[in-house]
Image: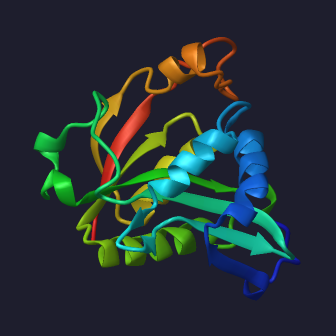
Amino acid sequence: MTTDINPGDILYQELAPEHFDGVITLGNEVQGDGYLNEDSLKDMYDKSFHGGVNASWVALYHGKVVGFRLTYAHSKWQEDKWCTPDDWPVDATRVCYFKCNTVDPAMQGAGIGSTMLKLSVEQAKKQGAQAGLAHIWLASPGNSAYRYFSKNGGVLIKKHADKWRYESIYEGYECPVCPAHCECEGAEMLLEF
């Protein structure tokens, strides 16, 4: 983080369609080409709502998207083979899904990720969730994603090999660390509210 950033200049807003271009650009720069597109983001946005409450957020700095947290409402996602609900300490129907958290590398260290997580948790509680699940990218630089989620109360449930391989083979995702198809390991982590 540059030392001249004033955290008070960072504005947090619920994700809205006017943020889509900035979110797609930042997501693909940080997470890898093909990570987000207009259709996939629209689908994620729609899954953010339950009872008129939106659980996804963006961080803006001088009008530019510098961070986003995409969160699916507990009623809008399905477990898959990368989930072990029998190991979750809460009812699986009351678990939201923390799809993605991304912060501009130049803005990291300003508390953006943690602030957006807290905002998403507040909204998820209003929606009726009791916990949130995330699949954490264990190949993030310095394993920062795992450290960040752990610091905010996330608990490791299980590690999953090749978590994003399917997306890299069939959906055009280009992992920023794997030279061919993604072989990165994902950590299934749960945060109780």
Tell me: 36 left or right of 47: right
Quadrant the C terminus occupies: bottom left
Residue 63 appears in the figure = yes
Tell me residue 66's x, y (percent). Answer: 75, 63
**Residue 3 in the figure: left or right of residue 174:** right
Query: Residue 78 versus residue 104: which sits nearer the camera?
Result: 78
Q: Residue 105: x percent and y percent? A: 76, 54
Q: Is residue 191 visible?
A: no
- Residue found at x 69% / y 72%: 110
The residue closer to the viewer here, 85 or 178, is 85
Circle count: 0
Question: Which residue is rendered at x = 41% and y = 75% of the image?
Answer: 123
Tell me the quadrant of the picture where the N terminus can be found.
Answer: bottom right
Q: Residue at x 80, y 83 (%)?
A: 6
Q: Is 173 above or below relative to 54? A: above
- Residue toward you, 106 or 98: 98
Q: Is 86 left or right of 110, judged from the image as shown?
A: left
Q: Quadrant of residue 68?
A: bottom right
Residue 78, quarter of picture: top left
The picture places residue 180, in percent across and down from the top left corner, at 66, 11
* Nearer to me, 24 or 138: 24
Residue 141: image quadrant is top right
Where residue 143 appears, as percent x and y from the top left, is 55, 43
